[in-house]
Amino acid sequence: MLSVKNLTKKFGEFKAVNDLSMDIEKGKITLLIGPNGSGKTTMLNCITGLLDYGEGEVYFHGENVTKAKTHELVEKGMVRTFQISSPFTRLTVLENMLVSYGKNSGESFVYSPFNKKWIGEEKDAMEKAYRVLDLLEITNLADDPAYTLSGGQLKLLEMGRALMTDAKMILTDEPAGSVSVPLAEKIFSHITDLSRKDGIDFLLIEHRLDVVSQFIDQVVAMDRGSVIAQGPPKEVFEDLMVIESYLKVKK
Ligand SMILES: Nc1ncnc2c1ncn2[C@@H]1O[C@H](COP(=O)(O)OP(=O)(O)OP(=O)(O)O)[C@@H](O)[C@H]1O
Ligand SMILES: [Mg+2]
């Protein structure tokens, strides 16, 4: 599904990601953990084309996507929520969903004169937007301007916009960051539904292990730029090195 081989990212002489290799299996929700500053965000930025890196290779569905550009990766179905996280605050929730829809021929110079084509697509976009809003239980917010949303509602909109892109895999940095535990659990349970029903894979970062652990299938643990353990949650959480570097810090 997603395979990273020997990735290194330096800031000056400092290796934020250090010879990192990992394999993310298809059909899974994978949790990425590690202490603050261990390189989680930097690694996500490298593999999603937001940061250039020195060495390493990335494969997505068996295809070599090393150093591919962000938009090329989105077309292949690898979507980072961060890249679409700031909504257009003056647009409504529904409008924000529609601008994230991949196929907007009406906006293209070539297709704009051919009404029939893009009117059909607009209908598809609208149907999809409502389906996703229903799924995330925020249909009632469709006509509200994005600037009126709470932190948790913005997180759901962010997820909704990622889903408008036909993503096969969503990589997300704290999808429930700074929201209350009940809402965080709701967001993760939506993620579980999407993974099971729509076959979307997730790689997510979340520090609150007690909140997220019931929803995940596998764990990748990082420390100082490298992967120190990966596998089923029980195995990784019991791994001594992980306990030393991460779990103890959290206590
Ligand atoms: N643009 C940059 N320039 C220099 N150093 C950077 C830059 N971005 C990140 N770093 C450093 O790289 C290391 C890894 O940072 P990163 O943000 O990837 O960690 P993280 O695991 O996501 O941490 P957190 O859990 O706090 O989000 C840190 O030491 C950080 O200070
Ligand atoms: Mg981070």
Image (cartoon, grey):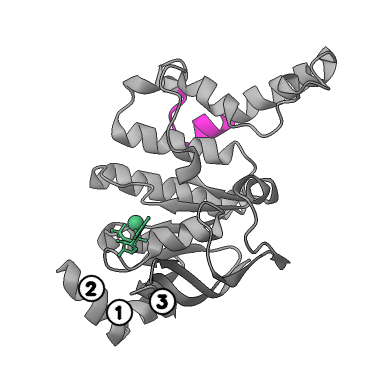
Give the side of residue 34 with respect to residue 70, left or right: left
How far apart marks 2 and 3 lie (CA) works out to: 17 Å
The image quadrant that residue 153 belongs to is top left
- Above or below residue 96? Residue 181 is below
Disc on the earlier residue, 1 or 2: 1
Checking the image for residue 242, the label placed there is 1
Which residue occupies the foreground of this view, 33 or 83?
A: 83
Residues in magenta? 131-139
Given residues 135 and 224, the one toward you in this image is 224
Q: Is residue 21 left or right of residue 240?
A: right
Answer yes or no: do the residues labelled 1 and 2 have beta carbons within 8 Å?
yes
Residue, disc 2:
247
Q: Position of residue 15 (x, y in %)?
A: 39, 72
Report the magenta stretch's main SS: helix
Instruction: Find the distance from the CA under tag 3 to the CA under tag 1.
Output: 12 Å
Number of the front mark, 3 or 1: 3
User: Residue at the spot x=26%, y=58% of the render?
Assistant: 208
Q: Which of pointers 3 and 1 lies earlier in the amino acid sequence?
A: 3
